[in-house]
Amino acid sequence: MGKFLSDFKAFAMKGNVVDMAVGVIIGGAFGKIVTSMVNDILMPVISLATGGADFSGKSVTLSQVTDEAGNVVESTTLNYGMFIQNIIDFLIIAFCIFMAIRFMSKFKKKEEEAPAEPAAPTKEEELLTQIRDLLQEQNAKK
Protein backbone atom coordinates (compact mmCIF):
# COMPACT_ATOMS: atom_id res chain seq x y z
CA MET A 1 0.00 0.00 0.00
CA GLY A 2 2.92 2.34 0.71
CA LYS A 3 4.32 1.89 -2.82
CA PHE A 4 0.89 2.64 -4.28
CA LEU A 5 0.59 5.88 -2.31
CA SER A 6 4.12 6.98 -3.19
CA ASP A 7 3.46 6.25 -6.89
CA PHE A 8 0.20 8.19 -6.74
CA LYS A 9 1.92 11.12 -5.02
CA ALA A 10 4.64 11.16 -7.69
CA PHE A 11 1.98 11.10 -10.42
CA ALA A 12 -0.19 13.79 -8.83
CA MET A 13 2.73 16.13 -8.26
CA LYS A 14 4.04 16.00 -11.81
CA GLY A 15 4.01 19.42 -13.43
CA ASN A 16 1.57 18.52 -16.19
CA VAL A 17 -1.08 17.14 -13.86
CA VAL A 18 -0.92 20.12 -11.52
CA ASP A 19 -0.94 22.57 -14.45
CA MET A 20 -3.93 20.78 -15.95
CA ALA A 21 -5.82 20.88 -12.65
CA VAL A 22 -5.17 24.61 -12.31
CA GLY A 23 -6.30 25.10 -15.91
CA VAL A 24 -9.55 23.21 -15.32
CA ILE A 25 -10.34 25.23 -12.20
CA ILE A 26 -9.56 28.56 -13.88
CA GLY A 27 -11.46 27.44 -16.98
CA GLY A 28 -14.55 26.68 -14.89
CA ALA A 29 -14.41 30.09 -13.25
CA PHE A 30 -13.76 31.76 -16.62
CA GLY A 31 -16.76 29.92 -18.08
CA LYS A 32 -19.00 31.31 -15.34
CA ILE A 33 -17.76 34.83 -16.02
CA VAL A 34 -18.38 34.53 -19.75
CA THR A 35 -21.81 32.95 -19.20
CA SER A 36 -22.74 35.83 -16.92
CA MET A 37 -21.46 38.32 -19.49
CA VAL A 38 -23.56 36.68 -22.20
CA ASN A 39 -26.74 36.27 -20.11
CA ASP A 40 -26.58 39.52 -18.15
CA ILE A 41 -24.93 41.96 -20.55
CA LEU A 42 -24.92 40.84 -24.18
CA MET A 43 -28.25 39.04 -24.48
CA PRO A 44 -30.30 41.98 -23.13
CA VAL A 45 -28.57 44.25 -25.69
CA ILE A 46 -29.20 41.72 -28.47
CA SER A 47 -32.78 41.34 -27.27
CA LEU A 48 -33.22 45.14 -27.34
CA ALA A 49 -31.70 45.33 -30.83
CA THR A 50 -33.97 42.56 -32.13
CA GLY A 51 -37.11 44.05 -30.62
CA GLY A 52 -37.28 42.03 -27.43
CA ALA A 53 -36.45 38.62 -28.89
CA ASP A 54 -35.23 36.14 -26.28
CA PHE A 55 -33.39 33.26 -27.93
CA SER A 56 -33.24 30.95 -24.93
CA GLY A 57 -36.99 30.39 -24.86
CA LYS A 58 -37.40 29.74 -28.58
CA SER A 59 -38.60 26.28 -29.50
CA VAL A 60 -40.70 24.37 -31.99
CA THR A 61 -43.25 21.83 -30.78
CA LEU A 62 -42.82 18.57 -32.65
CA SER A 63 -45.63 16.60 -31.03
CA GLN A 64 -48.15 16.92 -28.23
CA VAL A 65 -50.17 14.45 -26.23
CA THR A 66 -53.44 15.77 -24.83
CA ASP A 67 -55.97 14.29 -22.44
CA GLU A 68 -59.77 14.13 -22.99
CA ALA A 69 -60.21 17.70 -21.73
CA GLY A 70 -57.75 19.03 -24.32
CA ASN A 71 -55.00 19.80 -21.84
CA VAL A 72 -51.45 19.17 -23.01
CA VAL A 73 -50.06 16.27 -21.01
CA GLU A 74 -46.78 15.79 -22.80
CA SER A 75 -45.02 17.61 -25.60
CA THR A 76 -41.83 17.08 -27.51
CA THR A 77 -40.03 20.29 -28.39
CA LEU A 78 -37.00 21.26 -30.40
CA ASN A 79 -35.27 23.94 -28.30
CA TYR A 80 -33.34 25.78 -30.98
CA GLY A 81 -33.16 28.92 -28.83
CA MET A 82 -30.87 27.21 -26.31
CA PHE A 83 -28.77 26.00 -29.23
CA ILE A 84 -28.39 29.58 -30.47
CA GLN A 85 -27.58 30.70 -26.92
CA ASN A 86 -24.88 28.01 -26.60
CA ILE A 87 -23.37 29.02 -29.96
CA ILE A 88 -23.18 32.64 -28.79
CA ASP A 89 -21.57 31.48 -25.52
CA PHE A 90 -19.05 29.39 -27.44
CA LEU A 91 -18.13 32.22 -29.81
CA ILE A 92 -17.59 34.65 -26.95
CA ILE A 93 -15.50 32.14 -24.99
CA ALA A 94 -13.45 31.29 -28.08
CA PHE A 95 -12.89 35.00 -28.79
CA CYS A 96 -11.83 35.69 -25.20
CA ILE A 97 -9.41 32.75 -25.21
CA PHE A 98 -8.03 33.87 -28.58
CA MET A 99 -7.43 37.38 -27.25
CA ALA A 100 -5.78 36.05 -24.07
CA ILE A 101 -3.46 33.75 -26.04
CA ARG A 102 -2.66 36.52 -28.49
CA PHE A 103 -1.80 38.88 -25.63
CA MET A 104 0.37 36.25 -23.95
CA SER A 105 2.20 35.42 -27.19
CA LYS A 106 2.96 39.12 -27.82
CA PHE A 107 4.23 39.42 -24.25
CA LYS A 108 6.36 36.30 -24.71
CA LYS A 109 7.79 37.63 -27.99
CA LYS A 110 8.86 40.83 -26.26
CA GLU A 111 10.68 38.73 -23.65
CA GLU A 112 12.40 36.68 -26.36
CA GLU A 113 13.37 39.76 -28.39
CA ALA A 114 15.21 41.34 -25.46
CA PRO A 115 18.83 40.34 -25.96
CA ALA A 116 20.32 38.58 -22.99
CA GLU A 117 23.54 40.10 -21.74
CA PRO A 118 26.48 37.81 -22.35
CA ALA A 119 27.77 36.29 -19.17
CA ALA A 120 31.14 37.54 -18.03
CA PRO A 121 33.86 34.97 -18.59
CA THR A 122 34.89 33.02 -15.55
CA LYS A 123 38.47 33.07 -14.31
CA GLU A 124 38.95 29.60 -15.78
CA GLU A 125 37.76 30.78 -19.20
CA GLU A 126 40.10 33.79 -19.03
CA LEU A 127 43.02 31.50 -18.13
CA LEU A 128 42.16 29.10 -20.96
CA THR A 129 41.96 32.03 -23.38
CA GLN A 130 45.41 33.19 -22.32
CA ILE A 131 46.80 29.67 -22.76
CA ARG A 132 45.23 29.43 -26.23
CA ASP A 133 46.70 32.78 -27.23
CA LEU A 134 50.18 31.74 -26.01
CA LEU A 135 49.98 28.46 -27.94
CA GLN A 136 48.95 30.33 -31.10
CA GLU A 137 51.91 32.67 -30.69
CA GLN A 138 54.29 29.72 -30.27
CA ASN A 139 52.88 28.01 -33.38
CA ALA A 140 53.19 31.24 -35.34
CA LYS A 141 56.91 31.56 -34.46
CA LYS A 142 57.69 28.05 -35.78
Image (cartoon, rainbow, N blue to C red):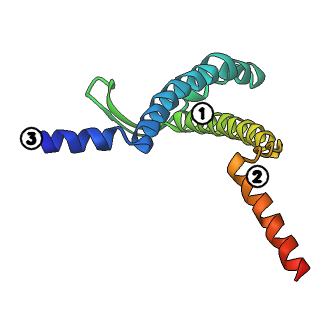
Q: Residue 48 versus residue 17: which sits nearer the camera?
A: 17
The answer to which image quadrant residue 5 occupies is: top left
Q: Does the CB distance between marks 2 and 3 fall below 8 Å?
A: no
Question: What residue do we see at 69% from left, 38% from top?
Answer: 95
Q: Which badge, 2 or 1, is on the more N-terminal residue?
A: 1
Q: Which badge, 2 or 3, is on the more N-terminal residue?
A: 3
Q: Would you name the residue on which mark 1 appears?
A: 89
Residue 77: percent from left, percent from top: 43, 37
Element on which disc 2 rests? helix
In the displayed structure image, the side of residue 119 where residue 27 appears, left or right: left
Q: Which badge, 3 or 1, is on the more N-terminal residue?
A: 3
In the displayed structure image, the side of residue 93 where residue 111 appears, left or right: right
Q: Is residue 70 above or below residue 135?
A: above
Element on which disc 1 rests? helix
Tell me the quadrant of the picture where the N terminus can be found.
top left
Distance CA(mark 2)–CA(mark 3): 56 Å
Residue 42: percent from left, percent from top: 69, 22
Q: Residues within 10 Å of mark 3 (few under 14, many from 20)?
A: few
Residue occupying the far bottom of the picture: 142
Question: What residue do we see at 73% from left, 42% from top?
Answer: 105
Q: Could you say which disc has been placed on residue 1 in the image?
A: 3
Q: Would you name the residue on which mark 2 appears?
A: 126
